[in-house]
Amino acid sequence: MATRLSLSQLIASSVPVFESHPKADKVFATADDNIFLSENHARNHARQEKLEVHTITRAEALNIAPVNEADEDPDADEDPDEDQAPK
């Protein structure tokens, strides 16, 4: 039986693919260490090999935290005790 990789191993394997394809936002991986840019190709391969397809995002592979502007606090650098009255 062929070696099957865990999701964390597949994520690590996807890093060079994202580096080679800077416009790709996600890739599709199978446990036999095949990484596809096309979900259709990944599903066809997975069906033949009886494998699951994992979707891996660029942010996940390159460990980039997604930016949510609503969560950004422009006053984050300020001292939280600064606005409180002295006790």
Image (cartoon, rainbow, N blue to C red):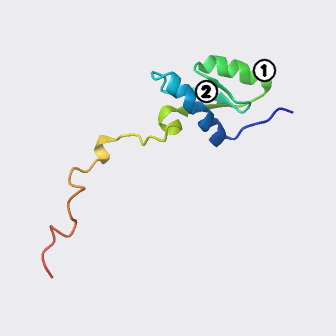
What is the x, y in percent for residue 36?
Answer: 62, 22
**Is there a contact, CB below 8 Å, between mark 1 and mark 2?**
no
Please state if 68 lies on the left or on the right of 39 as rendered: left
Which quarter shows the N terminus? Answer: top right
Most extreme residue toward the left, as rendered? 85
Please tell me whether mark 2 sits on a helix, a strand or a loop: strand
Q: Position of residue 26 (x, y in %)?
A: 52, 27
User: How busy is the neighbourhood of tag 2: few (under 14 within 10 Å), some, or many (20 plus)?
Assistant: many
Question: Where is residue 25 shown, x and y percent of the image?
Answer: 48, 26
Q: Which residue is mark 2?
A: 28
Q: Residue 10 occupies which quadrant of the picture?
A: top right
Q: Residue at x 12, y 75 (%)?
A: 85
Q: Is residue 49 above or below residue 12?
A: above
**Spatial separation of the CA atoms under disc 1 and disc 2:** 15 Å
What amino acid is labelled 2 in the image?
A: Phe
Instruction: Name the one closer to the observer, 52 or 25.
Output: 25
- Specify the farthest residue to the right: 1
Q: Earlier in the sequence, mark 1 or mark 2?
A: 2
**Residue 35's x, y, as percent?**
64, 25
Question: Tag 1's secondary structure?
Answer: helix
62 or 43: nearer the eye? 62
On the rendered image, what quadrant is the C terminus found in?
Answer: bottom left
Using the rendered view, name the quadrant where residue 15 is placed: top right
Q: Amino acid at mark 1?
A: Gln
Q: Measuring 65% from the left and 40% from the top, which residue is drawn there?
A: 9
**Residue under numbered circle 1:** 48
Compared to residue 48, the image places residue 16 above or below, namely below
Point 20% across, 70% down: residue? 81
Q: Residue 84: which disc?
A: none
Quadrant of the rendered image containing residue 43: top right
User: Residue at the spot x=71%, y=18% of the render?
Assistant: 44
